[in-house]
Image (cartoon, rainbow, N blue to C red):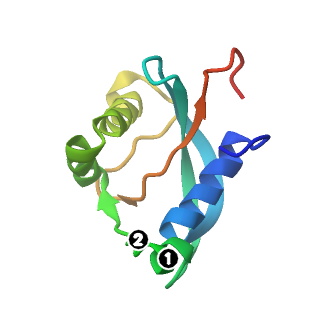
Amino acid sequence: MEPEEEPGGAAVREVYEEAGVKGKLGRLLGIFENQDRKHRTYVYVLTVTEILEDWEDSVNIGRKREWFKVEDAIKVLQCHKPVHAEYLEKLKLSCSPTNGNSVVPPLPDNNSIYVTSAQTSGLPSTVR
């Protein structure tokens, strides 16, 4: 996150910069704290409104965009970013229709997702 930037704004900016995707920020799905690394990760829904053919990171560093089903994203993340895989696993569990959670609908396995995160360091005492 940039100084003075809110987590939702950081998420929108990061997905634009890293994936060349624009969209409308939806609900906050969860906040995950990592005490060891001293950061907090916010996970949001983003409704995609525009997918750019070329974007800064694709041109400058050759970054590629790829879409995954939730289960496939978890498998890929387990190899490269296991903590992020845990976030998706926890989100799936917390959104399960069998756990009595009526506030957050389930994450369907057949939806494509792009995963990005906004992290804060230092774990401030208040959650924004």
Give the residue at mark 1.
60
* Residue 108 vertical position relative to residue 33 in the rendered view, above or below: below
- In-front residue for pair 80/112: 80
**What percent of the width, then of the height, locates residue 109?**
29, 51
Density class for disc 2 (Cα within 10 Å; few <14, some 14-19, many ≥20) is: some
Amino acid bearing label 2: Arg
Residue 63 bears which disc, if any?
Answer: 2
- In-front residue for pair 70/101: 70
Query: How many labels, in total?
Result: 2
Q: What residue is shown at x 67% (from left), y 41% (from top)?
A: 7
Q: What residue is shown at x 44% (from left), y 72% (from top)?
A: 61
**What percent of the width, then of the height, locates residue 71?**
24, 49
As drawn, the residue found furthest toward the right would be 4
In the picture, measured across the screen, residue 127 lies left or right of residue 68, that is right
The secondary element bearing badge 1 is classed as: helix
* Residue 109 vertical position relative to residue 59 in the rendered view, above or below: above
Q: CA distance from mark 2 to mark 1?
A: 8 Å
Amino acid bearing label 1: Asn
As drawn, the residue found furthest toward the front would be 60
